[in-house]
């Protein structure tokens, strides 16, 4: 096996959007997660509203309302 070709595999901190942190091992320096087992509805049994309004607004700003409109077909004369 060749020496010094593998990435380093260190302990890193995983930070969730809810504020929970835990430690795992990875080649990354830091891991940011949107949900974890402390706040995910599957594990907690509670429903949670995921804020997707920002995504929708960004999409509409980028593509406008013309994205969903069908192109006008030319009528034969």
Image (cartoon, rainbow, N blue to C red):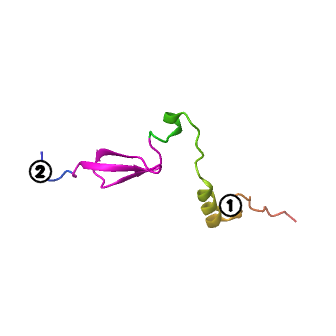
Residue 20 position within the rendered picture, expressed as x and y whole percent measured from the top left: 41, 47
The answer to if 20 sits in the magenta stretch is yes
Secondary structure category for the residue under label 1: helix
- Residue that label 1 marks: 67
> Considering only vertical position in the picture, is 3 above or below 46?
below
Task: Name the disc covering residue 47, or none.
Answer: none
Q: Toward which corner of the image does residue 76 lie, by quadrant? A: bottom right
Residue at figure coordinates x 59%, y 52% from the top left: 51
Q: Secondary structure at mark 2?
A: loop
Q: Which residue is mark 2?
A: 3
Q: CA distance from mark 1 to mark 2?
A: 53 Å
**54 with respect to 67 (left or right):** left
Is 48 situated above or below 52? above
Q: Nearer the viewer, residue 61 or 69?
A: 61
**Closer-to-camera residue (70/39):** 39
| Residue 27, position as x, y percentages in the image | 27, 51
Say left or right for 49 vs 8: right
What's the residue at 71%, 63% (across, down)? 65
- Label 1 close to label 2 by CB (< 8 Å): no
Q: Residue at x 62, y 56 (%)?
A: 53
Q: On the rendered image, what quadrant is the N terminus found in?
A: top left
Highlighted magenta segment, given as a residue range: 7-36
In this view, 45 is above or below 6: above
From the viewer's perspective, is 48 left or right of 75?
left
Task: Note whether 7 is above or below 75 in the view shown.
Answer: above
Mark positioned earlier in the residue sequence (1 or 2): 2
């Amino acid at each position: 096996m060749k020496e010094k070709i593998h990435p380093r595999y260190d302990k890193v901190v995983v930070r969730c959007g809810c504020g929970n942190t835990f430690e795992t091992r990875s080649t990354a320096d830091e891991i940011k997660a949107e949900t974890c087992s402390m706040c995910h509805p599957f594990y907690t049994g509670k429903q949670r509203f995921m804020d997707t309004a920002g995504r929708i607004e960004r999409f509409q700003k980028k593509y406008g309302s013309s994205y969903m409109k069908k192109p006008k077909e030319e009528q034969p004369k």
